[in-house]
Amino acid sequence: MKNIKDYNLEELKQEIENIGEKKFRAEQIFKWLYQEKVKSFDEMTNLSLELRDKLKENYTMCNFKILKKQESKDGTIKYLFDVLDGNAIETVLMSYHHGYSICVSSQIGCKMGCKFCASTGINFIRNLSSGEIVEQILAVEQDKKVRISNVVFMGIGEPLDNYDNVINAIHILNNQKGLSIGARHISISTSGLVPKIYELAKENIPCTLSISLHATTNKKRSEMMPVNNSYPIEELIKACKFYLEKTNRRISFEYALAKDNNDNIEDAKGLIKLLKGMLCHVNLIPINKIENGKFTKSSNENIIKFRDFLNDNGIVATIRRELGSDIDAACGQLRRKNLN
Ligand code: SAH
């Protein structure tokens, strides 16, 4: 059956017309789904019983079941959701002084194989649909009775490898008649799928682009991220420059510091050379060691030194806070251990 949450408002109008109803019903349904956050068609009380029956016959609401919920000392919550086909995905809710932020998964598994990432070695199973991406936000809002203001595509999966569904999910999230989460409050993080960065630049969606850079030479980056063999650093930076030219939106470069690997001053110098003059920000992430992984965390002292060196040389850099590390919910720690 079709998932009613897979459609943006325009598509939903079409769907509703196709089952012989007036278009404005789509707006009412949208409001029930995303503003009232109901979990059944029966709760849509301004629709006739006949229409509710028709909806039930044609669509599911895809309400995820919570399989597991782990709460960190710092308030971060990791959810394991049953996506209703025997698979499970992880979603993380983080609370900041300015509101709630959610880290969503875009795929079940990942094809990228980054060596430092806990998703590495997990088989790729499938893309999530737009509705399944949106449902992560709804399910958490329903559970915690909070409003989520920021969405980051930094959970499991490569969002640009599931391009159409991610873009459509953003359209659904954006709609003011629905969840009304502005694109400026949404970040897409990519390991660097160059052709898709060009495509995204032309979308006219003012979301934030995050690039998982992590190294400044092709040799080192390819060792950490096999995707670099297909799209080397020069091509990646060229695509970023095109993105900046088109959107004038600051890019965020993610750089996970691993001890004796990419964390010395020579690496910082490489980063400065690469990013000089670009409208960007560097997010330094203390790398989280994964099981059997060869990369270990850089010392705090070194991370601060690295940051200061970048800042002193005209590159804005900050160190990412590690939320949820006690529940394996911190950056890159989402893993298969819990899945199935
Ligand atoms: N596939 C996308 C999004 C998912 S990963 C991407 O690669 O950007 C989200 C971020 O976490 C990326 O910047 C990724 O490089 C980083 N990350 C993955 N594993 C990590 C680890 N063990 N420690 C720190 N950061 C990690």
Image (tube, rainbow, N blue to C red):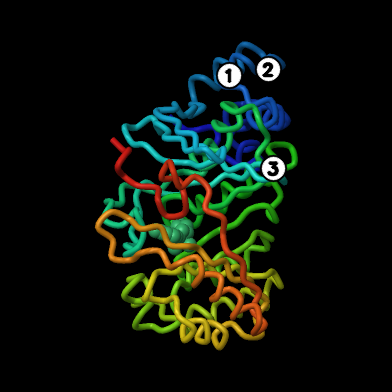
Could you tell me residue 319's position as x and y percent? 58, 64
Q: Which mark is residue 47?
A: 2
Q: Which mark is residue 104?
A: none
Residue type indicated by callout 3: Gly
Identify the residue at horizontal 71%, vertical 50% (top origin). Answer: 182
**Which residue carries the number 1 mark?**
41
Could you tell me residue 293's position as x and y percent? 28, 61
Residue 227 lies left or right of residue 94; in this view the side is left
Q: Secondary structure at mark 2?
A: loop
288 or 146: which is nearer to us? 288
Tag 2 or tag 1, which sits nearer the N-term? 1
Identify the residue at horizontal 56%, vertical 65% (top origin). Answer: 210
Tag 1 or tag 3, which sits nearer the N-term? 1
Residue type indicated by callout 2: Leu
Disc 3 crowd, CA 10 A, few/some/many (<14, 14-19, 20+)? few
Q: How many marks?
A: 3
Q: Which mark is residue 99?
A: 3
